[in-house]
Image (cartoon, rainbow, N blue to C red):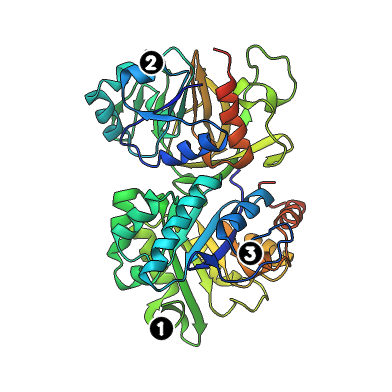
Amino acid sequence: MKVAIVKYNAGNIFSVVHALQRIGVEPLLTDSAKELRSADRVVFPGQGEASGAMHYLRERGLDEVIRSLTQPVLGICIGQQLMCRHSEEGDTDCLGIFDADVKRFVPLRHEDKIPHMGWNSLSPCFPLPMSESTSPAVAAPLFKSLPQRGSREGTPFVYFVHSYYVPVCKDTIAVCDYIHPFSAAMQKDNFFATQFHPEKSGAVGQQILRNFLELNR
Amino acid sequence: MLAKRIIPCLDVKDGWTVKGTNFLELREAGDPVELGKAYSRQGADELVFLDITASHEGRKTFTDMVQRVAAETDIPFTVGGGISELSDVERMLSAGADKVSINSAALRRPQLIDEIATRFGSQVCVVAIDAKQDAGGWTCYLNGGRIPTDRNLFDWAREANNRGAGEILFTSMNHDGVKQGFACDALSRLASELTIPVIASGGAGKLEDFRDVFLSGHADAALAASVFHFGQISIPELKQYLRKENINVRL
C-alpha cells in the first residue's frame, strides 16, 4: 500500500512517519501532486498556524490537489482545521471540505486552560451510518476494535494539543468535551480527520491509524 | 474531561539511565528507550527524559537517544537538561521531542521563554522550577538546586506563565527524595494563580500522595522517578487506585 504524507510547513510531521513505520508502513513524504493523487492513502498532518499553512499550500497548488483527492484522506490536528471552511486563526480561508468554521477556545472558568493539552475522552457519535452496533467504540470504521487499554468504560482516551476547535456539526463523527463539546473527529465522503494526535495516543491511536489504512475505498 | 497525568522521569547520563530499576521484564533496564517503552505499555501518560551529562559528546548521545524514543514510543515526551538557547530547542524538536523543559537558562535569561513560545508555540515550552521553602518563603534555585537566587517561586512562575510557558514543572526541594508527599500547599497556590497546567514533582512515596497532589494540590500532572523505577508503585496499580478515588485518569 502506498501511503503519502502531505509535505508542507506545519512542523513535527515525523511523529506521523514514525507511527506509520511502527505499524509496518513506509510512508512517502511528498508535495508532488502526482504522488499524492496516485497514493492509496493520504495523511494530512501537522502542528502549526493556519494562515501560514494555507498560504504555503496555495502557493504550490496543493489546496486544489487535496480537495480533489478521491482516496481516503486523514487530516490530523491542524490538518482537520484546514479542511474546514474558515479559521479564526489568522482569519484564514481554508480548504472548505467540511462545512464548518474553526473557532478559538474561550475559557469560561479558571480551570479552562488554553491550549487544551493532554488526554481526553473520545465519544463516537450516534447514529452512524452502516452500523447496528450498540457499542460506541465500534460504531464508526475509524473507531472499530479499539483496545480496552487506554479506555474508560468503553470510552477511549486520546491525546490533544490545540487552541482552536471545530464546533460539532453534521460531519462530526466523534465528540470530545473541553469547555464545551467540539468535533474530535470528522468525516465527509473519503475525507476523515481527527483533532487529536493518533500518532501520540498510544495503543488507541495506533488502532485508529490501522483502521484508516484498512478502510474500504 | 481532561485526565490527570502520571509522568515517570528518567535521568540519562551518556545515553544510559542513572538510577537502577526493578523492572523484572526488562533485560536492559539501563536503556532509557526500553524503559520508556515499558512505562508507556504500563499506562504512563507522558515521559520526561533529563540529560544530566555535562560533556559535549554526551549531548550528542542524548540527541541520538531522543531520536530513538521518537521512533519507538507512541506517547508524548519532554526532554530537558542543558537546554540554554533556541538552537538546543530546535535540535531536540527536530530529533522528535514533543516538548522541552528549561530551568536555569530561563532564570538566567527569561526572554528565552518568549523566544521558544513565539518560534515553536507555548505547548512545547515547559518551565521547570526547583524551589525551597525557608523562613523567607519559597526561593528558586539554579543548577539542579545548588545555587539560590533572589527569585520567589510564585513571582517567577507567574512571570514564566505571562511570557508564554506552556506548563510549569515545580519541584519542591524540601519534599524531593523524602517520600512524604508532594508540596500540596504551594502547588495549590500555583494552580490558583497560574493559567497554565502545573506538573508536581518531588515527594511521591505512596499511592495516597498522588491522590492528595490532585485533590488538595490541584496539580494537572504528577511526576515521579524512584517510586516507579524501584517498583514501589506500579503505574497500573496507581491508576486503578486513583480511579477508585474518583480521579479522572486514563486507564
CB-based contact (under 8 Å), mark 3 and mark 2: no
Give residue B34's position: percent from left, percent from top: 60, 55
Query: Could you tell me the amino acid type at mark 2?
Result: Arg
Residue B213's label in the rendered image is 3
Residue A188, percent from left and from top: 49, 15
Q: Which residue in the structure is indicated by mark 2?
A: A37
- For the residues labelled 1 and 2, say whether their Cβ atoms are less than 8 Å apart: no
Q: Helix, strand or loop at disc 1? A: strand
Nearer mark to the viewer, of 3 and 2: 2
Q: Which residue is drawn at 45% across and 70% down?
A: B129
Q: Can you give x and y, in whole percent of width and height, for residue A148 in the image?
A: 72, 37
Residue contact at pointers 1 and 3, CB within 8 angstroms: no
Q: Is residue A1 above or below residue A88?
A: above
* Quadrant of res B21: bottom right
| Vertical placement of residue A75 versus B151, above or below | above
Measure how far apart labels 3 and 2 are at the Cα level.
52 Å
Q: Residue type at mark 1?
A: Ile
Q: Which of marks 1 and 3 is in front?
A: 1
Q: Which chain carries label 1?
A: B
**Which residue is nearer to you in this view: A127 or B6?**
B6
What chain does badge 2 belong to?
A
Q: Can residue B126 be seen in this view?
A: no
Using the image, tell me which numbered label, if any, was put on residue B147.
Answer: 1
